[in-house]
Image (tube, rainbow, N blue to C red):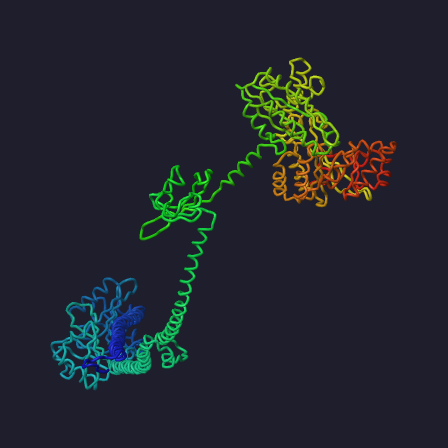
Amino acid sequence: MNAKKGSFRLDLKWRAMLLTSFLLLALTSLIVWVSNHSLMSQFQHSRDEFYENQSQEVSYNIQRSADVMRQMAGMVASSEDLGDALLNGSPSDAEWAIIATWPTLQLDVGVDDVVVYNRNLQPVVTLGRELEFASRKYSHEWLSDVLNNEKPSDRLLCLESCQQYVAVPILAQGVDAGVVLLTRSLADITRYLQKSSGSEVALLISSEDPSSERRYLREWKTSLAAVTHEAEVLPFIERMSQDFPLSATRGKALSYIDSGRRYEVSSIALETGREDKPSSFFLLISDVTDQLKEITKTTQMILIISLIGWAAAEVLLYLILRYRMDHLREISQKLPLLAEQNYSVMRRSIPRKKSFFVDEIDALEITAIELEVKLEDLEKEVGKRGVELEARVAELARERDFIRGLMNTAQVLVLTHRRDGVITLTNRLCQTMTGLDEQDLRGCTFQQLFSKDFFNADEYLKAGGQQESHFVSVDGIVRTIVWYHTPLRVDGDQRELISVGVDITERKLAENRLTWLANRDPLTELYNRRFFEEALQRAVTPEAFGAVLYLDLDRFKDVNELSGHQSGDQLLRAVASTLSGLSRGYIVARLGGDEFGILMEHTSTDTAVDLARKIADHLDQQSIHIQGRTHRASASIGVAAYPDHGDRPDSLMANADYAMYRAKEDMAKRWHLLQPDQQDREELKQRVFWAERIRSALLYDQFELLLQPIFRLIDFNIQHYEALLRLKGDDGEYLSPGTFIPIAERNGQIAAIDRWVVGKGIELISRFTDESISLAINLSGQSLQDKELMSFMKCEFDKRGVEPRRLIVEVTETAAVTDFTSARGVLEDIRRLGCQVALDDFGVGFSSFYYLGQLPSDYIKVDGSFITTLPDSEENQLIVKAIADIAKGLGKKTVAEFVDKPSILPYLRKYKIDYVQGFYLGRPQPAAEVGIR
């Protein structure tokens, strides 16, 4: 406690101690009271149980005494001599009959009197003292009831003394002979009760007429029939009778203090069995002084222990609070040092101490020191941030200059404008493209200059977006601009749009160029096969009519072989120019290699024939001169009209192709229109049949690949297989590819077949149990014009999880040379994908050696026409040896086909051919028979 400025203040520790003292004292008082109350309740409960037990004990002992006397009386009444004496009226004989049992009744049972009555209830034998009971009126009535009912009975009568009576009827010779009566006093029960209870016992009998002045209690109007320790107890009872009425002891114990000791007095009433009897009681006197003293002692001990605990708690609390409050006061006095930034003094004045038990004050101390450290660090950080802020301001200035320079040098249009479109800021490119300075641009709107189309400023202000617009620059060029709009918050809630425009004019031109290239043949700039087929699909409808011209250049291969592929390209461009000039208004396309097509919509057959005749005439007159050679551009033209010659694009193209082959047979006219004669109809039917059959086989997966092994010649190990395409006929036999492949090549179905072969071949590779085995598949020349073939193959490899190196792609020498430029590009793409390439049927044209080094390939397959006659033809031996030597010099492997007899093998070993295949070594067989999972 201290005083400050005249005001009294109680410290926290004293307040805590006072409140704790009040609480502990209240708890101490409550504990003492509860303990004392509990002890007294237990004591009272035990006394109540004692009183109840003694009441039951009195009743039990009286009943037990009556039962014993009844048994003794029954034993006496059962004596035959006694019964006969009573019937004969001989008192002496009756006395003699019971005199023998009298000592036993006196000594063992404690019987005071025995009286034998005859059947007239006259006493015959009397042993003991003279009975006062016999003179009573109700004694005769009771005995008469016993004799008449022939049933024993007992009674308790308290007159001058309390006696227990038992009467038993005597039966002799089947008739009532009399009654035997036994009596006994309650002195034995009194003594037993004193022993069992440990209390003094007195037997009181209510009486108006005192029989003895010394034992008569006038206040209670009772006589003292029996008492234990009479000398001490009688004066006590006399004193208590003067202070309390007898009724105070009935039903509960009376607490009475005499001579400094406390007694409990209770009375137990005796049932005498008659309404006119005097009342009688057992009076129990118990000295409970020692028990009460023990309770008082225990209560005092609890009080002392509680007070000692209270005092110890207060002392301990004082010691704890004194040190901790002094520590807290020290911390509170030093905290203002933090505001003065005197951090080092703070740490020195509050040294951190290690404590086993950490409380809130220790936590406050730790927090204060940590706060000091943090404040000091914060002050240092503020200083550091100040320096950084200055650097940041300078950096922002540099960034501002950088952004300004970037906006002015970046080749994009950058401007900001308000919601109404008024421009607020532009970069230098905006000024350059529009020819206006910054001030003039600020007076214009975005819609007025850059977006004359619809412009929704509200939409872009919400979430931004992009748009494409056109505007005419100062140089008069219409430019395509892609605008990217982003909302920009300025002052308060005012928002503007920052728009960045990218000039994509050149990209648009490039896209248009790519679109043109997607539909055009890059060599001739005519439409390509894909565009032609799509246009044909749109044109051939049930209501439409028109015609298709199918052109194939004659002897084009000779041009490539004699003068090179560049001469062939020059001839193709010249033919394309002629076709374009003669076919204005029609769709002219290069279908691949040296094949062209013309789609004439809404045109009659006569018009189509006229155009075919003009084309044939003009091409006959057209020639090119290269390296001293003259090459003429002659062509065979097939004409097919729809819907007469086909109501579907595939059937129409098949018929046009057929007409072209018929034109080749007529070298004078050079064009052919299908006629309705029988032969043409049969051939058309066959072409339509096979076109449908091929379509069905592709749709329902009816093709099959047979695998023919290819052996390494030095050890005859199988290195790879060649997949040979077959189609089962209706009789279950395999159909030769020569039956349907030419038709598929002419009607365009060969490309779909090639894709089926590629997909099926890659699937078979994935199922080979030996992962070192490769598979060779054949592709047609038309697939070398398929620009999507590479993506299809890559997708199949990824789907099946097959390494591309295990696939060998075979193309014929003729297909590769016909369109050398395109073929070379496709084969290079196939090798870049990881696949291997083989040139099939090589050597048919000896001039093909020129292309052997130009075409990308890994294997050279010598044409079977040279192999089958190898032992008999020296010319073929020279050709095969030349092919093997040149291939080896170029680092390519050689494969000999059609090895059908053993006599061929020595020559092949001599020429160092690498691989061999043929019927002699292994025939084509289903895939399931060659180790397929």
Residue 389 occupies quadrant: bottom left
Q: Position of residue 357 (x, y in %)?
A: 39, 77
Residue 9 visible at all: yes
- In terms of depth relative to the viewer, which is nearer, 210 or 846? 846
Horizontal side, residue 836 vs residue 585: left or right: right
**What is the count of numbered marks?**
0
Q: Residue at x 67, y 17 (%)?
A: 682
Question: Percent x, y for residue 629?
Answer: 75, 29
Residue 809 is left or right of residue 93, and the answer is right
Task: Answer above or below: position of 267 versus 926.
Answer: below
Q: Is residue 145 above or below residue 212?
A: above
Q: Image quadrant of residue 12?
A: bottom left
State the image coordinates of residue 660 (x, y, percent, origin top left): 67, 21
**Residue 367 position (above or below residue 807):** below
The quarter in which the N terminus is drawn is bottom left
Is 260 in front, or is 758? 758
Quarter of the figure that contains the C terminus:
top right
213 vs 517, nearest the viewer: 517
Is residue 461 visible to us here? no
Q: 245 or 382: nearer the eye? A: 382
Query: x and y percent of residue 134 in the render?
Result: 18, 72
Q: Quadrant of residue 220?
A: bottom left
